[in-house]
Amino acid sequence: MEAMGRLGGRTAIITGGEGSIGMATARAFVAEGARVWLAGLAADALQSAACELGDGAAGWSVTDVTDAGQVAAAVAAAMDRFGRLDIAVSNAGISGAIAPVTEYPDDVFDRVLAVHVRGSFLICKHAVPVMGPGGSIIITSSVVGLTSDANICAYATAKHAQVGLMRTLAKETAPLGIRVNTVHPGPVDNEFQHTIEMTATGQPRDLAARAFDAHIPLGRHAAPDEVARTVLFLASGESSFVTGATVAVDGGMSI
């Protein structure tokens, strides 16, 4: 008899599912026996990802995480397709502008908080009622949800706010046997991060990446798979006594 894997028989919804961390997480989950519902904005990328994972293992929906109706519909679609929901990964995000607080565009600030904070709130709000004991919610925050830096007020504020949401929800859902945690990646080797770095430094991609590496004690960016393995741990029974935790995957940046 084949081993079921660490997530055998379980179902997950992953927002930002077409991105590098979302897709790395989906691959890790499916490899451990889970079925996944990918929610995101890019239909072609979502469809391609679901095809890669296999029709029996994955489904997808175009979902704006700031829209309550669309989030509710994505959770309902996952339930209709797979019959249960055990894991929710709130991973959708945008970077915002690089500017001091006094010059930061109001509309960009509002949009960054809407995607990260309202988006996480909505996926939690609609996932918890259909989860049973043993459920796990993981919110992708950032190293700047533990620290911060100049000129990133919207992103850092949003990432800190996700921690407040997580801690509140962890206390509310503990009696239900549902765990809630945040993951805090440092710089990841993906287009999202490289765009931030080039904007922040005004340098070409390679030079900008090296400048950021100089601030990372381990001296390099993370691979998306390294973040995904931490999410997998928090989704699995291996972390059965872990809730309300801020788990840094940042190469030592938050030391």
Image (cartoon, rainbow, N blue to C red):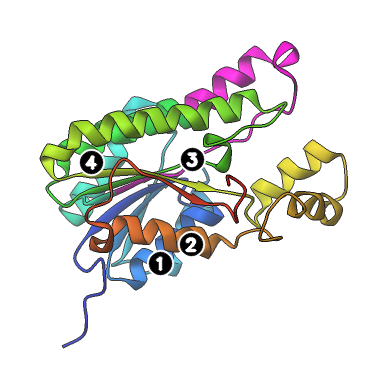
Tag 2 secondary structure: helix
Q: Closer to the observer: label 3 or label 4?
A: 3
Q: Are marks 2 and 1 in contact (CB under 8 Å)?
A: yes
Residue position for label 1: 28
What is the distance, in whole Å, between disc 2 and disc 1 at their CAs?
A: 6 Å
Q: Closer to the observer: label 3 or label 1?
A: 3
What is the distance, in whole Å, between disc 3 and disc 1 at their CAs?
A: 19 Å
- For the residue pair 115 and 54, the one nearer the viewer reads as 115
Residue, x 75% and y 23% (percent of image)?
A: 99
Residue 65 drawn at (x, y percent): 42, 33
Marked residue nearer the N-terminal end (2 or 3)? 2
Q: Amino acid at mark 2?
A: Ala
Residue, x 33% and y 30% (percent of image)?
A: 122
Q: Amino acid at mark 1?
A: Ala
User: What is the number of the mark on residue 24?
Assistant: 2
Is 210 situated above or below 57?
Answer: above
